[in-house]
Amino acid sequence: MSIPQPGNVEGTAVSQGDLPLSDERMQFVNRIAGSQTFAKARQLRDILCYIGMRTFQEGAVSIPEHEIACGVLGRRDSFDPSEDNIVRVQFGHLRKKLEQYFATEGCNEPLLLSIPRGSYVPRLEPYTAIKPIPIPDGVAVLAGNGHEKWLGWLMRRWVWVVAIIAIQAVTGAVFYRLGGAVQRTSPPPDPIEASEINGAQNLSQKNLIAQRIFRTNLPVSVVITDANLVLLQNVLYKDIPISDYINYPDNILSDKESGSLGHALAMAASYRYTTIGDLNIALKCDEIAQMFGTKIVVRFARYTNVRDFEHGNFVLIGSRRGNPWVSLFEPKLNFFFKEQPGTHAFYFENRHPARGEQAAYYSVYDKHGGDVSYVDVALLQNLAKNGYVLLLDGAVMEANEAAAQLIFGNNLPQTLSRLIDGKHPAGDHGPIEIFLRVHAIEGTASSIDLVAVRPLQEPD
């Protein structure tokens, strides 16, 4: 069979036994690679065409990582995948690009091309698309780049606030059902898989941070970002302190704005939206809680109060701009999230720079096409000093998500573990602060660097 062009295939059904011949499959691959979605992703185009040729023309059933690194990405024969993760990173970006293509330009394709995780061999299967929601002319959808970026765009085009709310609803609806907080006891599955037992043992024995958050009899509360709070602050050019957030949004919007902008802001402020990154972190925490049989509570920032922090363990996601409860613990931190007057640029102030450290760390756009942002990870005691609070205090979504993946890994990197252990006397693992630099491409973290580790002093 020949593959129809996307514009003429609506309603076409393709059976598994009716897949195209090898040349037609390569035409399909080349059409995807030549689409607007891949227009500015030359390296991803090269990878896609290469694995398409190896699979559909040469019949490869597996493609080694070393072959892709040397044959497509220009690495030398001495390439060691255990030391260089470039292939895995690029395939992560490629999978996201393919998802983007089939959700937009390729929504009428009769076939779906995907790359299963754990493999570098593409797969074709019949595709029934979910038609995209029409978006008004002039509205751009900025996916996966963190709420600070699309909110900055929104400030310049506030007339589309309502349209953005409609798009956000896909993610927000998940958290609307939380009703402010969902509480569950998370016992391990029955029967317990050996891999889960090993995972819990690794976390309990080697990960000092996971020990203090999950290896207790205390419930764990994951407090997720109020994304619309960030929107409101960016549009109004103001910080909303925790004292005002208690009665938010009525006390903020009253007599501040009028007309269509005020109406749009009131609508935005009234909903409960968070980011997809917060969702991923909450799911990761739930996974760890299941390993330990720990009770987990997911809380929306707006439905949390000061007294909650007097009992139990907490994971606070985001900076105080989206999670004002972070400000309860900011006086103890060395790296302080600030706004530069005039430019409204956000950065981390290093209150006590050590040798070789900068006094300030700004997020920047790298000339090679990648974002550089920062996240401050801090583990402190709760307000009553009977539990712990973990802060993932980053300016953008991908920074917080990358930090969570590092901190909640089965094994902390040895360098970081030694630094954490070495900051306190043996057996006295006190409060600690870890400052990280995150490199991201198209909203996905590609690498993470350790900038500084600080012991923190808790007042008596």
Image (cartoon, helix red, strand yellow):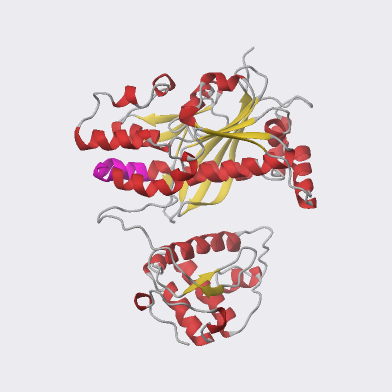
Magenta region, mostly helix, strand or loop?
Answer: helix
Would you identify the image quadrant in which residue 153 lies? top left
Q: Position of residue 339 (x, y in %)?
A: 39, 30
Would you identify the image quadrant in which residue 312 lies? top right
* Residue 63 visible to the viewer: yes
Q: Residue at 63% of width from left, 59% of height from top?
A: 84
Magenta segment: does it hold 157? Answer: yes
Total marks drawn? Answer: 0
Would you identify the image quadrant in which residue 322 lies? top left
Between 261 and 234, the one lying in front of the other is 261
Q: Residue at 42% of width from left, 29% of height from top?
A: 338
Magenta segment: does it hold 360? Answer: no
Q: Name above or below for residue 29 compared with residue 152.
A: below
User: If the image is split into quadrants, where does the C terminus sit?
Assistant: top right
Q: Which residues are magenta?
A: 150-161
Q: In the picture provided, is 222 more to the left or to the right than 324?
A: right
* Residue 299 visible to the viewer: no
Between 416 and 228, the one lying in front of the other is 228
Q: Position of residue 294 (x, y in %)?
A: 70, 35
Q: Name above or below for residue 388 compared with residue 72.
A: above
Q: Position of residue 291 (x, y in %)?
A: 73, 42
In this view, the residue farthest toward the top is 460
